[in-house]
């Protein structure tokens, strides 16, 4: 007698794709939130985790799903264990309309005498980033900065020298700049006064 094989219900591929997308998106947004909470730029996190800036950017934007060892390296830097990271009790802060002065996120290790404060409302899908920048006399960003996207800024007070792709540009109060941030760039305050800049960049991650 032939043995009747049990009916195996096929899993709907669209449901699997949807689930995988949800998991990937959850990972990207959580890493994004943890990084901002630590005050790390993407470049800083990448350096500490032994990864490239491009890899961190792709993970946060849900373009790729990180391997377990890669995720572990990132979470070690962010001081979060895997159990907490994947906990259903994860506290995801709701996005807000108003960002108070005390809630600005100050990026770390951007250069001695340099302060970069990010305006962010906790929304992981934010498309535009905004920085409030302050440069002490004779200060500069620590190294040549490279990150995908574009940046537009205006010097509110003081003066700044921008080295963009090897070319120097001297801006004074009221001057603005538009740069391709995928090319190496450095900001330097050559004066004895404080320089203040406001800038917007895409993508919102930095």
Image: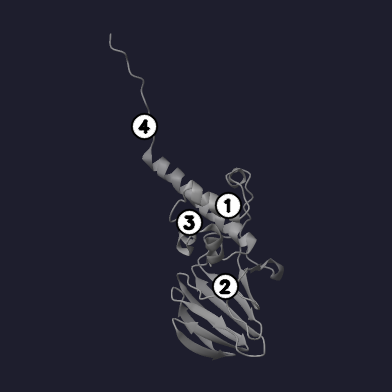
Q: Nearer the viewer, mark 2 or mark 3?
A: 3
- 4 relative position to 131: left or right: left
> For the point 56% across and 84% down, which residue is it?
154
Looking at marks 2 and 3 on the same chain, the residue that comes earlier in the sequence is marked by 3
Looking at marks 1 and 2 on the same chain, the residue that comes earlier in the sequence is marked by 1
Q: CA distance from mark 1 to mark 2?
A: 26 Å
Label 4 element class: loop
Q: Nearer the viewer, mark 3 or mark 1?
A: 1
Q: CA distance from mark 4 to mark 1?
A: 35 Å
Label 3 element class: helix
Checking the image for residue 59, the label placed there is 3
- Residue carrying label 1: 75
Disc 1 crowd rating (10 Å Cα; few below 14, some 14-19, many 20+) is some
Q: CA distance from mark 4 to mark 2?
A: 47 Å
- Residue carrying label 4: 10
Label 1 element class: helix
Q: Give how far across and how far down residue 194 sits, in percent.
A: 67, 86
- Residue carrying label 2: 130
Disc 3 crowd rating (10 Å Cα; few below 14, some 14-19, many 20+) is many
* 17 over 186 or under it: above or below: above
* 58 over 167 or under it: above or below: above
Q: CA distance from mark 3 to mark 1?
A: 13 Å
Q: Give how far across and how far down residue 183 sits, in percent.
A: 44, 76
Q: Nearer the viewer, mark 4 or mark 1?
A: 1
- Observer-nearest residue: 96 or 8? 8
Looking at marks 4 and 1 on the same chain, the residue that comes earlier in the sequence is marked by 4
């Amino acid at each position: 007698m032939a043995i009747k094989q049990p009916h195996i219900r096929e899993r709907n591929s669209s449901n699997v794709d949807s689930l995988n997308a949800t998991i990937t998106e959850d990972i990207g947004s959580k890493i994004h939130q943890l990084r901002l909470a630590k005050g790390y730029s993407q470049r800083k996190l990448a350096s500490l985790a032994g990864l490239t800036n491009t890899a961190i950017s792709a993970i946060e934007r849900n373009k790729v799903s990180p391997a377990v060892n890669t995720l572990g390296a990132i979470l070690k830097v962010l001081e979060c264990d895997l159990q907490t990271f994947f906990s259903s009790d994860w506290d995801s802060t709701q996005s807000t309309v108003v960002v108070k002065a005390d809630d600005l996120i100050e990026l770390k290790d951007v250069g001695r005498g340099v302060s970069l404060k990010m305006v962010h409302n906790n929304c992981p899908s934010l498309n535009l980033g905004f920085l409030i920048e302050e440069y002490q006399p004779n200060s500069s960003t620590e190294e040549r900065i490279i990150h995908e996207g574009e940046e537009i800024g205006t010097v509110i007070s003081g003066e700044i020298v921008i080295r963009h792709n090897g070319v120097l540009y001297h801006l004074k109060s009221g001057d603005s700049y538009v740069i391709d941030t995928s090319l190496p760039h450095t900001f330097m305050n050559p004066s004895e006064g404080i320089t203040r800049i406001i800038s917007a960049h895409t993508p919102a991650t930095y």
